[in-house]
Image (cartoon, grey):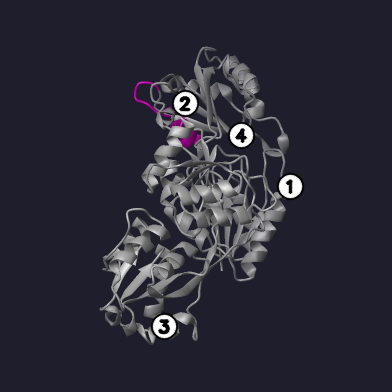
Amino acid sequence: MKVTLVGAGPGDRGLLTLRGADRIRNADVVLTDRFVGDEILAMIPDSAEIIDVGKYVGNHPVPQDEINRMLLEKAKQGLNVVRLKGGDPFVFGRGGEELELLAENGIPFEVVPGVTSAIAGAAFAGIPITHRDYASSFHVITGHAKNNEPTDIDYGALVDAGGTLVFMMGVSALGDICAGCINAGMDENMPAAIVENATMNSQRKFVGTVGTLPGIADKNAVVSPAVIIIGKVCELSAKYDWIVQKPLQGKSIIVARARPGASKLSAALRTLGCQVHQMPSPSIVPLTASGSHIENVMEKIDSYSWLVFTSAVGVRIFYSYLMERKIDIRKLHHLKIACVGSETQSVLGRRGLVADYCPDVFNGEALAQGLSKLVEDGEKILIARAKDGAEDLTRMLTDSGIDFDDVRIYDKKIDVKQLELPDADCAAFTSSSAVEWFAEAAAGMDISRIKAVCIGKKTAATANSHGMETYISQEATIDSLIEKIKALLQ
């Protein structure tokens, strides 16, 4: 039993701390605010209860007292509770208030600091919040007072201090803030900037002066969340703007995967500046219980000459089964191994195994064609794969007269209750099964408008069969898929 206040940072998944990620992944209950990024919310385990307390500036659908009470009640139930807050819990995040009731009742708690948008917003706009030649201090001020009362800001003291001024939650009060600075003696030509949705794919930055910034923000319909920065350091924004250098900055991409776990494609796209909407993946259900097909097969393992894997998941499930049943891996010493895909090869390699055959083209058809030339008369194949495995492999092996057993060692379970189809520039698919589950999950929604960038002709054909506009990478690799996305969107 413990309550952890976790600062989720300004939105970018990469700015969440390692400790924060650990607490989220081990939570039983998560109370989350509006400005927590979708990619961070995706870390919450499926088993956890998610409570959206949805705090907006000036609009708290769940009152603060009620949030405090919920934290206490959930903790008293013996649960690990995470209070997930945008930015840092103690930087205008009311974290101190949320701890009071817990402390009074002897509930253990922990605070995980987060990267505040006061600093990250400036950094992602190319503005060094301090600089030896421009500002030796910075001051963080809230532009929003309690209960919507007028702010009590000593603009004279701030102007006299001479450092960089950072106002948070101040979009609606921008005109008053700039007027307050000017009335306190600040030159109306003092550089100033406002950064909307800082660190996110949808980030917008506008630079002007204290005198012009309110008009610029109004003309461009700037809305919260946004951070206001006033000071000479804003002059450096154009020179140091590193975000605009990313080739896919401002683009939004759906990544649909047919298996759970981290996505190398998603990580690479984020590095290029994309906002990645990673659709919920199916959960993997091992089919290796007592009396299962694989158990019967292992009793006659000496009758096989080849062991075939069509996915990295299949390798993991198979070797987990061996470990759980305490089956010595040397019992497989006589088997030659074939697989599909570089990731499957990599997972085998981490277990000290090198595939005897892996086709250059990563699909079942190519695998079957290669095996038909390698399997000798009298040799038998054991295929360990998913329950919904493609029929190309088994059909072509049958046509070639090759003897095999197709053993289903895992299944995929899809929960689509909360699926929402985001607006995106395109969707990326690395397998036909990913397309199929995505189409199933989006049943009843219009997916014909989606531009589907696919690995391989078979994946593209599947996407095309569901009415999507398809594009095919030149090679069946993640790098080639990304190059196709860049060519399409740049």
Residue for point 50% across, 47% down: 460
- Residue 304: give x, y in percent of width and height: 33, 79
Q: In the picture, residue 341 is in which quadrant?
A: bottom left
**For residue 237: magenta?**
no
Task: Indicate the amino acid at tag 3.
Answer: Val
Residue tagged 4: 169
Task: Indicate the amino acid at tag 2.
Answer: Thr
- Residue 61: give x, y in percent of width and height: 73, 47
- Residue 441: give x, y in percent of width and height: 62, 55
Q: What distance separates the C-alpha of mark 2 from that of mark 1?
A: 34 Å
Q: Please, what secondary structure does the residue beneath circle 3 have?
A: helix
Task: Indicate the amino acid at tag 4.
Answer: Met
Q: Are marks 2 and 3 in contact (CB under 8 Å)?
A: no
Q: Would you say 377 lies left or right of 468 here?
A: left
Q: Earlier in the sequence, mark 4 or mark 2?
A: 2
Q: What distance separates the C-alpha of mark 3 from that of mark 4?
A: 63 Å
Residue tagged 2: 164
Q: Would you say 362 lies left or right of 148 here?
A: left
Q: Earlier in the sequence, mark 3 or mark 4?
A: 4
Q: In the picture, residue 345 is in which quadrant?
A: bottom left
Residue tagged 1: 61
Closer to viewer: mark 2 or mark 3: 3
Residue for point 43% across, 33% down: 487
Closer to viewer: mark 1 or mark 3: 3
Q: Please, what secondary structure does the residue beneath circle 2 have?
A: strand
Closer to viewer: mark 4 or mark 2: 4
| Residue 297: mark | 3
Closer to viewer: mark 3 or mark 4: 3
The part of the chain drawn in magenta is 118-134
Q: Please, what secondary structure does the residue beneath circle 4 have?
A: loop
Q: Would you say 442 lies left or right of 250 here?
A: right
Q: Around disc 1, counting alpha carbons within 10 Å, would you say few (fewer than 14), some (14 to 19), or many (20 or more)?
A: few
